[in-house]
Amino acid sequence: MSRQLTLFHLDHVAPNSFSTTNKAAILGIEGLSYYPDFLHYIERNQLLRQINQQDWLLAGKRRVQHYGFVYDYEHGGIEDSESLGPLPNWATELVFQLLRQHIIDTLPNQLTIDEYLPAQGLANHATDVVKLGEPIVLLSLCAANNMTFTEKRDTTNKGRWLLEEGSLLVLKGKARYDWAYGIANSRYYYDQDGKRFQRKPWLTLTFRKVQ
């Protein structure tokens, strides 16, 4: 499992600055906030280099990394209550950046990194509400992809949102506890206007708070 994640070609990417304007209550879901361009291209490259230096595990057909605690994909919770230790320094730096910018007010102590190749997805699910608190924070790297949301009490109430490269998604309150989310097993993703694009390898960093 030595495949390296693709770094950005700096001569082909225009610099972006972090947008402090979030699209609060996106899709009409209370507590669901989105921050485009949270990390600009230099920060993304630096983070990817750190991730590439770590060991990967396999969860099914996907490559993953766990920090703090091992995430249980089958049950949407924590596999073992025994801690793996504190988050690494490069992850802690991200956490304090979130705190400084008042995006979160609680320190996460668990991080899972997932690599999704084209056509790989994640079944619609809701995370454990007993062992895992809020918020849940998801950072997108390497590419863009869609995430789908389904209300638990009314599964006909669904929505799809585009998670852009370098963006941040935050689930608090009702978004955290009343909605399930997933990723389609598709080779394509769609922008907010419905235009279709070919998927590329996509990386997510998901920060959680183990109670």
Image (cartoon, grey):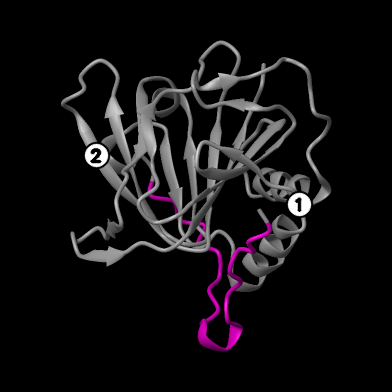
Q: Residue 172 carries which label?
A: none
Magenta region: which residues?
2-23
Picture layout, residue 175 above or below residue 65: above
The answer to whether residue 170 is magenta is: no
Q: Does 115 sit above or below residue 125?
A: below
Between 107 and 47, the residue placed more toward the observer is: 47
Q: Magenta segment: does it hold 8?
A: yes
| Left/right of residue 176 with respect to residue 52 in the rendered view | left
Q: In which quarter of the image is residue 84?
A: top right
Query: Relative to 82, does residue 103 appear above or below in the rendering?
Result: below
Residue 81: x %, y % from top left: 72, 15
Ranked by sequence position, the earlier of labels 1 and 2 is: 1
Q: Residue furthest bottom?
A: 11
Q: In this view, does 203 lie to the left or right of 158?
A: right
Which one is in front in this view, the residue at disc 1 or the one at disc 2?
A: 1
- The residue lying at 67 percent from left, 16 percent from top is 211
- Which type of secondary structure does the marked residue at label 2 adopt? strand
Residue at which label 1 appears: 54
Q: Label 1 is placed on what type of residue?
A: Gln
Q: Which of 25 and 137 is in front in this view?
A: 137
Disc on res. 159:
2
Rate crowding at label 2 as few (under 14), some (14 to 19) or many (20 or more) other CA atoms within 10 Å. some
